[in-house]
Image: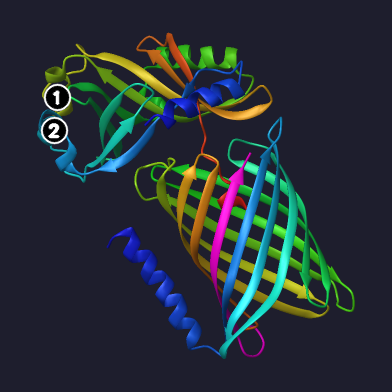
Amino acid sequence: MSRYSLLLLTALVFSLNSLAQNSFEFGFLPSINLNKGLPQDWSLNLKTESRQSIAKQQFSYEYLLTDISIAASKKIGINTSIAIGYLARVDENSLKNRAMQQITFIKRYPGFRLAHRLLTDQTFAKDDDAEFRLRYRISTEIPLQGSSLDPKEFFAKLSNEYLNSLQGKSYDMEIRWASFIGYAISPANKIELGFDYRIDSFVEGDSRNRLWLSLNFFTSF
Amino acid sequence: MRTIPIFFILILLALPGLAQLKYEKETRVKRGDIPNVALNFVDSVNFGSRIKWYKEFGLDTIAYEAKTKSSGKRYSIKFLQDGSLVDVEIEVKPNEIPDETYSAITKYLANKHNKYSIEKIQIQYTGDSALILEFLQSKGSDSDLVINYEIVISSKVDRSYTMLEYLFSSKGEFIYELQIVLNRTENIVY
């Protein structure tokens, strides 16, 4: 089976699985990532991501929120980097503040790259208990036109993330799967299009299922 | 194609003082795109495993490369556009290099880098293509071949982590050093 067929099948399985669950939402999740390399292996990442719902039981457009984040990262090994960051989540009625800390390990294999990310975050909002999360994500980037990704070539990106959340006395787990087709426009620019499926609230009660059509743009300068 | 040298020159200007950069762009190609001489060479080895063919664009050269894994070893066989053999590289472990050679190589690297880690070692065979073919077919020895060792290390250079490719002779003498341009990773980090 070709890599393209496998990705299409993955996306289809996610979609069908979602439709059969308790609650379902479908929407858009575009993001822009700006990255600036700094001396001595430091770098800055500025990201903005918008969330828009177009179907929740029935079709209806609704703007949900926008995330704006900044992270400072330092490479502490050829394959390892640490980062701290701040995220502001803005919706029509509230502002949430989130602090983030992460460590990432990237391993280069012949034909693909594998990244492990361990992330903790703490979210604070007026009138809400603080939320503490511990997250682990594994993701891979697979060049589709060679053994390494070069400019003007397509790639696939797959990821799976587990998010443990503690808010007040309430524990929840969220699981995410994502599959993307990407294109390396140049050494500093990549674009990705794909599906990001998320399920949560299944530990206690009815599960909540969300499927986002994501369009990500990464640029470095 | 014109963008490749321009990209290379921009990087050179942006990173003065570092080792010469290694730039290669490779793309997967089909058997039908490969010169017959090269196809015949690889087919004659009888690897017994799937061969993947790539077209490799260097700064001023275009080459074809066959990659495969056979008997637990990774092989790369490079040809020029006319099908003539450039070299054969086989990935090996440190204990597959003669002790004296390995000692000379690690001594050189230790003198040059405070702390480094070996990421990959390949034995590189060049010379008469008929003799190399006989060697790959286990019909001849490597005694008449030119043997070099290509070693990729990670190290900290000018306070930044980087990967470097070295070539050493069969006696462990330094031949060249190239800095590998690493692909960006933001899309799997954030």
Q: Residue B173, percent across and down?
A: 42, 8
Which stretch is magenta? Answer: A203-221
Mark number for residue B133? Answer: 1
The magenta stretch spans residue A210: yes
| A48 or B34: nearer the viewer | A48
Q: Quadrant of residue B125?
A: top left
The residue that label 2 is drawn on is B45
| B149 or A159: nearer the viewer | A159
Q: Amino acid at mark 2?
A: Val
Q: Amino acid at mark 1?
A: Leu
Local SS, label 1 = helix
Q: Residue B168, percent across and down?
A: 41, 14
In the image, is residue B54 above or below residue A121? above
Decide if residue B121 is on the left or right side of residue B113: left
Q: Residue B176, percent across and down?
A: 44, 13
| B144 or A48: nearer the viewer | A48
Q: Residue B93, percent across and down?
A: 39, 30
Picture residue at 81% right of the left edge, 80% below the top: A169
The CA span between labels 1 and 2 is 7 Å
Local SS, label 2 = helix
Q: Which chain letter matches label 2? A: B
Picture residue at 74% right of the left edge, 50% below the top: A71
Decide if residue B21 is on the left or right side of residue A136: left
Residue A23 visible in the displayed image: no
Q: Quadrant of residue B68?
A: top left
Q: Earlier in the sequence, mark 1 or mark 2?
A: 2
Decide if residue B70 is on the left or right side of residue A73: left
Question: Are circles 1 and 2 on residues that touch, CB within 8 Å?
Answer: yes
Mark number for residue B188? Answer: none
